[in-house]
């Protein structure tokens, strides 16, 4: 049984036998943009590592697994220290490239693992991760001044908090659109946080419809599936949470 094929209550590291090797976690690595490599740990939904180079992203992966379990522990009220020995194995590799029909659009990786249908226990942990991740993002962004994001590194498209919130919503809405689901423009709230929350609600409502379904679609040269959509939504929010944490750490 693969690690991710266990129900949520059992989705914990099994303590290795003292004579055994480290627990191995299947992962994929890809470029999302030049100088931005991301490791997605297939065996742990919502667990990622990133770096400016492939080597840096892989080197950070073990620490990110420990941070992931520490975060889960705090959220579910079981903050036991994580002491297991893990080895993140890169099972798949992909690089982004311009779409031939429109080089302004980028095609990102579709891993073989993305084709696996979402199982009921995947939806259980996914629902919690989507809630907890959004709580963290709103808490961090709520403590910032409107122009604080102008101090973020590598953030050319958003200089204000509203810009960042808008970017978050637009990206998640784009992913919904790729999967054939959108929020009607007439239903969109006028404020950025309201739009962000409505789009997330729509995404969460779609997840049960995707359970056990063999869905693979292609839009603008890029393949999508329910598992990839979930992976990209959780990654995108986690990436900006890390950005905000770095920003807040350096505010006077």
Image: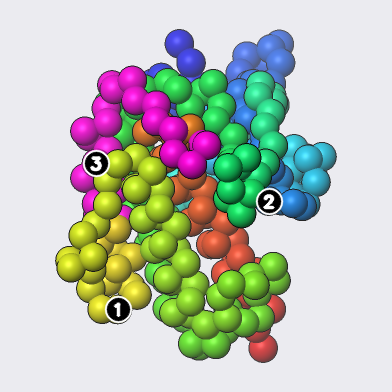
Please report whichever mark, 3 or 2, sits nearer to the chain's N-terminal start: 2
Structural distance between the alpha carbons of marks 3 and 2: 28 Å
| Residue farthest toward the front in the current orientation of the protein | 101
Q: Is residue 117 magenta?
A: no
When asked about the image quadrant of residue 15, the answer is top right
Magenta segment: 200-222
When asked about the image quadrant of residue 192, the answer is bottom left
- 21 in relation to 239, above or below: above
In terms of secondary structure, where does tag 2 sit?
strand
Residue drawn at the location 45% of the way across and 11% of the way down:
1
Q: Nearer the viewer, residue 136 or 236?
A: 236
Q: Nearer the viewer, residue 18 or 125?
A: 125
| Horizontal side of residue 217 vs 21, given as left or right | left
Q: Which mark is residue 206?
A: 3
Residue, disc 2:
33
* Residue 102 point in image, percent of width and height: 58, 48
| Horizontal side of residue 107 vs 139, given as left or right | right
Q: Is residue 205 magenta?
A: yes
Residue, disc 1:
191
């Amino acid at each position: 049984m693969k690690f991710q094929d266990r129900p949520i209550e059992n989705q914990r590291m099994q303590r290795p036998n003292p004579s055994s090797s480290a627990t191995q976690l299947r992962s994929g690595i890809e470029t999302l943009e030049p100088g931005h490599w991301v490791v997605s740990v297939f065996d742990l939904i919502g667990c990622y590592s990133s770096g400016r180079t492939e080597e840096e992203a892989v080197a950070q992966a073990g620490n990110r697994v420990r941070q992931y379990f520490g975060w889960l522990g705090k959220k579910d009220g079981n903050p036991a220290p994580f002491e297991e020995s893990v080895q993140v194995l890169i099972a798949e590799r992909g690089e982004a490239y311009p779409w031939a029909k429109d080089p302004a659009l980028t095609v990102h990786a579709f891993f073989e693992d993305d084709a696996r249908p979402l199982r009921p226990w995947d939806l259980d942990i996914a629902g919690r991760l989507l809630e907890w991740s959004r709580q963290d993002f709103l808490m961090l962004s709520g403590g910032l001044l409107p122009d604080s994001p102008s101090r973020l590194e590598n953030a050319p498209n958003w200089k204000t908090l509203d810009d960042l919130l808008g970017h978050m919503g637009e990206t998640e809405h784009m992913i919904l659109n790729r999967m054939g689901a959108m929020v009607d423009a007439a239903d969109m709230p006028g404020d950025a946080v309201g739009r962000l929350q409505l789009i997330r609600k729509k995404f969460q409502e779609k997840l049960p419809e995707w359970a056990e379904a063999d869905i693979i679609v292609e839009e603008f040269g890029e393949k999508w599936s329910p598992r990839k959509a979930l992976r990209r939504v959780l990654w995108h929010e986690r990436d900006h949470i890390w950005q905000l944490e770095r920003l807040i750490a350096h505010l006077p």
